Image (spheres, grey):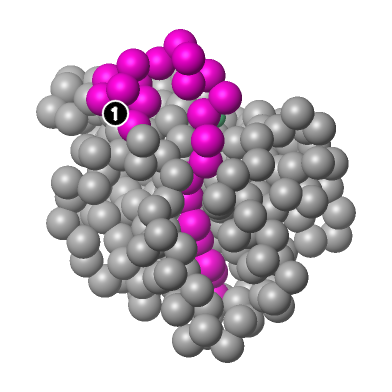
Amino acid sequence: MIYVTGDIHCPIDISKLNTKNFPIQRKMTKSDYLIICGDAGIVWKPGSGEDKWWQKWLEEKNFTTLFVDGNHENHSALQAYPVEMWNGGKVHRIKPSVIHLMRGQVYNIEECSFFTMGGASSTDREYRKEGKSWWREELPCKEEHQEAIQNLERANWRVDYVVTHTVADSIICRIDPMGIHDTLTELFSMIEKKLEYIHWYFGHFHGDKKIDEKHTLLYQTVIQIK
Ligand SMILES: [Fe+2]
């Protein structure tokens, strides 16, 4: 089984994953997956009791947690984890079953291919302090763009699912006419045109809405992909 949900901002919006709100987990195992579309916040204050407590909470769940990064992540702390290969793509392993899906990767999960690319621009940048609550690495760099394109080339521009935090410009316009357009949403617009895929799941805009047949914005809902 593979489930997907939106921003967690750990611990602010994590209650959607407790047993009461997500009861199917009683039947899940570590071979089942829950994917978070960014703003996970699972690695926020490295070494703090709070980080340790929530990482352990997820580790003790009956499923494997996978997350792409959003804008609200401690990007330097995430990047400090060693990179390892997992199911065909690069990851940071936070706990044995809590895994960060890195930018521009293609993974094979339960015989489905997934393209992942975290990051986004913060709309509340002015209220945040660099290195404490905001990191300039919130937007992918040129090398990460190139890696995404190379990995999609290798996949012949065909995957089953796309999981990101923000989304292509044309979709943003349908959600929020004031939404931020940046180098990443521009890259997604190019990918959108070229890539063959079944469905694109994303978060960031703090709403739950099926935009069209191929795009779903997720926040509080947890839906089954497979
Ligand atoms: Fe968010």
Q: Is residue 116 left or right of residue 88?
A: right
Q: Amino acid at mark 1?
A: Trp
Please report the residue visible at 58 percent of the width from the left and 88 percent of the height from the top.
Answer: 156
Q: Which residues are magenta?
A: 113-135
Q: Is residue 64 visible?
A: no
Image location of residue 106, percent across then percent down: 46, 72
Image location of residue 57, percent across then percent down: 31, 33
| Quadrant in the rendering for residue 11 | top left
Q: Is residue 119 left or right of residue 95?
A: right
Q: Which residue is mark 1?
A: 44
Image location of residue 72, percent across then percent down: 43, 30
Ligand 1 falls in quadrant? top right
Please report the residue visible at 46 percent of the width from the left and 27 percent of the height from the top.
Answer: 9
- Which of the pair 185/78 is nearer the observer? 185
Please report the residue visible at 36 percent of the width from the left and 77 percent of the height from the top.
Answer: 88
> How many numbered callouts?
1
Q: Quadrant of the N terminus?
A: bottom right
